[in-house]
Image (cartoon, rainbow, N blue to C red):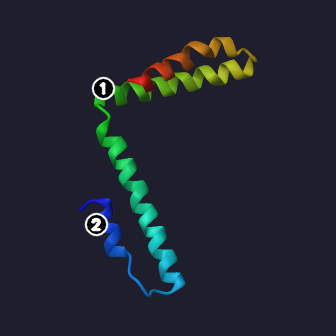
Amino acid sequence: KDLEEWSSLLLKDGESEEANAAIESARRLLELETKSYKKTTCLPSSIAARKAQLQSSAYSSWVKARENDDFASFAPSLQQCFDLAKE
């Protein structure tokens, strides 16, 4: 079932405000999980692996650059992150 089908099953007229709030929370959680699932499964594994490696090395570069107050040393890593995001 898709998000709309699940949402329609959750929504019922005449429910109490508490029930409506719980239903809305469940709907939002389902929406977020669907988005997360699509994001995870739609990314090719080769790009996902490169992204994970790049995030790790970029974070290390950021920590060092921050300690040394030297943004220029982090700029290449940041550019690589942007370039990968465009793919």
Using the image as rendered, state which of residue 40 and residue 1 is in the foreground.
1
- Residue 32 in which image quadrant: bottom left
Residue beneath the point at 56% across and 20% down: 78
Q: Identify residue for label 1.
A: 46
Residue beneath the point at 69% across and 16% down: 71
Distance from label 2 to label 1 (Cα)?
33 Å
In primary-sequence order, the first of circles 2 and 1 is: 2
Where disc 2 sits, the SS reads helix
Using the image as rendered, state which of residue 79 and residue 4 is in the foreground.
4
Does 34 sit above or below residue 63? below
Is label 2 or label 1 in front?
A: 2
Amino acid type, mark 2:
Glu
Does 11 sit above or below residue 70? below
Residue 40, image x, y percentages: 35, 42
Q: Identify residue for label 2.
A: 5
Residue beneath the point at 50% across and 22% down: 82
Mark count: 2
Where disc 1 sits, the SS reads helix
Residue 58, image x, y percentages: 55, 22
